[in-house]
Image (cartoon, rainbow, N blue to C red):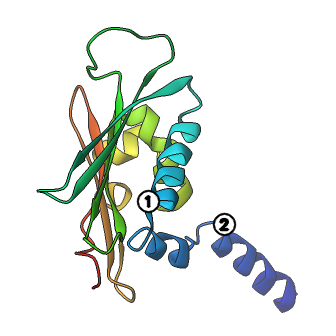
Amino acid sequence: MKKIILLLLIIGSSSYAQDIEYIKSLNTMDSITASKFAKKIIHNTGEAYEFSRTYLNPAKNVCNYVYRPKGFKGFCDDNCITISFAFNPEGNYYFSSANAKLEYLLPTWKELFIPHATLQSIVEDYKHFRFRDKTSGLNYMVHTNDYQSEIKNYTGQLNN
């Protein structure tokens, strides 16, 4: 009986475990891996989005990937998704933020950080809009308003 209870506890706790090593890897990527991660966020929306453009700002060490709803031709408003990476001269990228409607960011937030989060719990519960791992120093938050939301990496700067 004790073995069954222990097994259930292990199974139950593993369903809420994050892949800390994968999340850490978001702080040390090359440009190809950064692009793949941006595509993963888009894929997680479950919606038809297409790549629109890349904004590269070497003066600020920022690279933004912009995606728009498939077939959308107008000005990129709150329907678009922007995924930002900071980089250093050596070519190391780190995930900085993703901006979109909350319902489009929720699948990625759940997959990487808080598996049991909901739209309502992110807005109402501090434990669901912030992911913090004290051992690794990882620190991510969701900021939200009526139009856009943002997953923001507060972990720190690139390791040189």
Kind of residue at badge 2: Ser
Q: Residue at x 26, y 32 (%)?
A: 148
Q: What's the CA distance linking mark 2 and mark 1? A: 31 Å
Residue at the disc numbered 1: 31
Q: Residue at x 50, y 53 (%)?
A: 37
Mark identifier at residue 58: none
Kind of residue at badge 1: Ser
x and y percent of residue 122 in the render?
35, 47
What secondary structure is found at the residue carrying circle 1? Answer: helix
Disc count in the image?
2
What secondary structure is found at the residue carrying circle 2? Answer: loop
- Quadrant in the picture for residue 46: top right
x and y percent of residue 57 in the render?
19, 49
Q: Residues within 10 Å of mark 2 (few under 14, many from 20)?
A: few
Can residue 116 be seen in this snapshot?
Answer: no
Q: Camera-side residue: 124 or 157?
A: 157
